[in-house]
Amino acid sequence: MTKATTAIECRAVELNDLAWADFPSSLSKGGIKWKLLNVAPELGSWAAIFDCPAGSSFASHHHIGPGEYFLTKGRMEIRGGVEVGGETVTAPAYGYEATSAFHGKTYFPVDSEFYMTFLGPLQFVNEEGGATVALVTWDRAEAAWLASQG
């Protein structure tokens, strides 16, 4: 993807043809990288694959719309992990995030990689119910990706 998305019938992306880009550090810690694979304005969705080094995490966020992920490598602790009432998943694993799901922190204790489709925006916040830090919609995800490509 080298320019803003226009309407298409389909899209095929060769992952090895895309370079990893830094995911915005204002929304994550620990050097997470990503590849934006698709945006679909007609659905308000976007899909990406993430490379998450051991010790990395995503900032607190609400899923404004549902999402589905496939953890292809590693381990992910969602909502603090199973020890504190959240989920801990080990690859290979599939997960579904319902509309309005809140994640105080999504943490990767080991090198991990996952694919996710977001059906609607992510609202990054400082705390549950807190003020919006960033609202990542399909077009904001695309703009961040394009900016990272120089």
Image (tube, grey):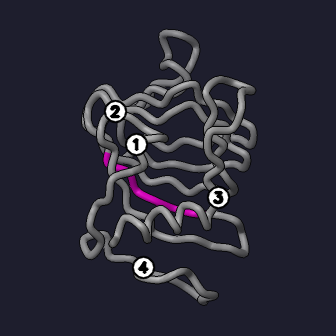
Q: If you read the primary sequence from the N terminus, does the residue marked by circle 1 or circle 4 appear first?
A: 4
Dot label at residue 78: none
Badge 4 marks a residue whose secondary structure is loop
Q: Which residue is mark 3?
A: 137
* Residue nearest the viewer, comparing 50 with 88: 50
Q: Quarter-wise, where is residue 42 in the image?
A: bottom right
Question: Considering only order in the chain, which callout, 2 or 4, is on the residue closer to the N terminus?
Answer: 4
- For numbered disc 2, what is the local secondary structure? strand
Q: Position of residue 40 (x, y in %)?
A: 63, 73
Q: Is residue 4 left or right of residue 73?
A: right
- Label 2: few (<14), some (14–19) or many (≥20) C-alpha neighbours in 10 Å: many
Res. 1 mark: 4
Q: Quadrant of the C terminus?
A: bottom left
Q: Mark 1 — residue?
A: 25
CA gap between label 4 and label 2 equals 26 Å
Point out which mark residue 56 bears.
Answer: 2
Q: Which residues are magenta?
A: 46-51
The answer to if 45 sits in the magenta stretch is no
Task: State which tag comes first along the sequence, 3 or 2.
Answer: 2
Alpha carbon separation for disc pair 1 and 3: 17 Å
Residue 35 placement: quadrant: bottom left
Which residue is at 53% across, 80% downward? 4
